[in-house]
Image (cartoon, grey):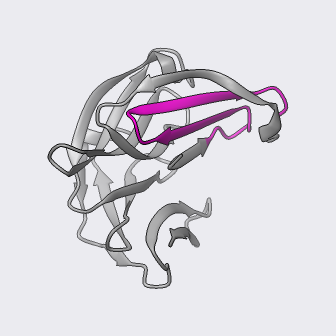
Amino acid sequence: EYGIFIKGDGTELYSVSTGSEGSQFSCSDAWNISSCENAGSLSTQYFIPHGIFFKDDGTKAFMSELDSFSNTPYITEYTCSEAWNLSTCSYNTEISESGDAGALFFKEDGKNLYTADRGNNQITEYSCGTAWNLSSCSDTGRDKSISEVSGNLDGISFKDDGTKLYTLGED
């Protein structure tokens, strides 16, 4: 498994892994992963997904993916006809990335997207003209190198008020 996302109430867990698949697990006991059971999946647009993130109402899923044929990284947007149900999500649009797509994170209002470049240990910030609309997002040029991470930068998250950045590295 590469990336995970947990619904805010702890009742759903989502993961992505090599092999064109996103998986959903429903948890009968919130925040207790031993109570989670497979609840569905989604075939991703590209073969190697690395990160997953959901809009706060569960109607959109976003993934960082790598096209293994062209070696091109993308951020993809999926629209979910049933909130928080991954198996009802369908491909909507994408933007290309310049680095090795890893984790991704949206600001709470959906107007800023942050992506992790696994190979260069760098975070790229995108500004979205329309909240939660990937096709309206553009690179701000305000990249941040994360030299403290050894190996690949595989996870990013922010404190709710935006004052702290958390990273996860892999050797």
Is 96 one of the magenta-colored residues?
A: no
Q: Most extreme residue toward the left, as rendered?
A: 70
**In this image, 29 relative to 11: left or right?**
right
Residue 84 placement: quadrant: top right
> What residue is shown at x 19% (from left), y 50% (from top)?
72
Along the viewing direction, whichever of 163 and 72 lies nearer the viewer: 72
Along the viewing direction, whichever of 79 and 31 lies nearer the viewer: 31
- Name the spot of residue 123 as percent of width and height, x first: 37, 68
User: Can residue 131 be seen here?
Assistant: no
**In this image, 141 relative to 170: left or right?**
left
**In this image, 152 relative to 170: left or right?**
left
Is 29 one of the magenta-colored residues?
A: yes
User: Can residue 137 be seen here?
Assistant: yes
> What residue is shown at x 85% (from left), y 31% (from top)?
29
Q: Is residue 5 above or below residue 155?
A: above
Q: From which residue to which does the magenta span run?
A: 6-30
> What residue is shown at x 58% (from left), y 72% (from top)?
164
- Name the spot of residue 34 as percent of width and height, x first: 81, 37
Along the viewing direction, whichever of 6 and 39 lies nearer the viewer: 39
Q: Most extreme residue toward the bottom, as rendered?
A: 147
**Count of numbered circles on the image:** 0
- Name the spot of residue 49 as percent of width and height, x first: 39, 43
